[in-house]
Amino acid sequence: MIGEKESLAPPSSGRSHRSGPESRSGGSVTDVARRTIDDLLAQARAELGHRPTPAEAHAAAQAGEALLVDIRAGDVLARDGSIPGAIHHQRTALEWRVDPDCEWRDDRVADLDAPLILVCSQGYASSLAAQTLRDMGFTRVTDMDGGFDAWKEQGLPVD
């Protein structure tokens, strides 16, 4: 009717918010322990172990001991610059480019034993991405502490 306020709440599904949707295992999603992004980051970094500094990553790349993989978005590279010789694969496509069994792989990095050092802007997204690659079976992947911002601050080469 004219003049009545419509409810902005979604129609009731018959479930309470407490029980939530069902998971594939049949239990409630709320049965899974909540982990914050800080929890995920701490776990990733603990499992990654030593994260090389920009100087260490640069030296490893120069010596042919590691491949630098820059996972920043293309517009960020255009704005801030890039690391000479680094392979660029945006975070959104990284897993497809490194998976040896994927038809869209990049053979330069699609080796589970390749020594990869992931680089993002500040070293947060790259830690999570490196952990994902470890979950995929990569044995020698880590990320650079401080990211590209630290690289640039230390006066290392930038294109």
Image: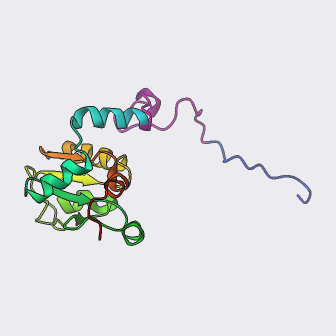
Q: Nearer the viewer, residue 83 or 8?
A: 83
Start-end of magenta stretch? 13-37
Q: Is residue 97 left or right of residue 16?
A: left
Locate residue 113, reporting x and y percent: 7, 49
Is residue 104 shown above or below 114? below
Name the quadrant of the N terminus. bottom right
Q: Nearer the viewer, residue 105 or 80?
A: 80
Q: Tell me what residue is drawn at x 38 percent, y 72 percent.
A: 78
Q: Nearer the viewer, residue 69 or 28?
A: 69
Residue 110 on the magenta segment: no
Q: Tell me what residue is drawn at x 35 percent, y 39 percent.
A: 24
Classified by dominant secondary structure, the portion drawn in magenta counts as loop
Name the quadrant of the C terminus. bottom left
Locate residue 29, reporting x and y percent: 44, 34
Q: Is residue 19 left or right of residue 85?
A: right
Q: Tell me what residue is drawn at x 60 percent, y 37 percent.
A: 14
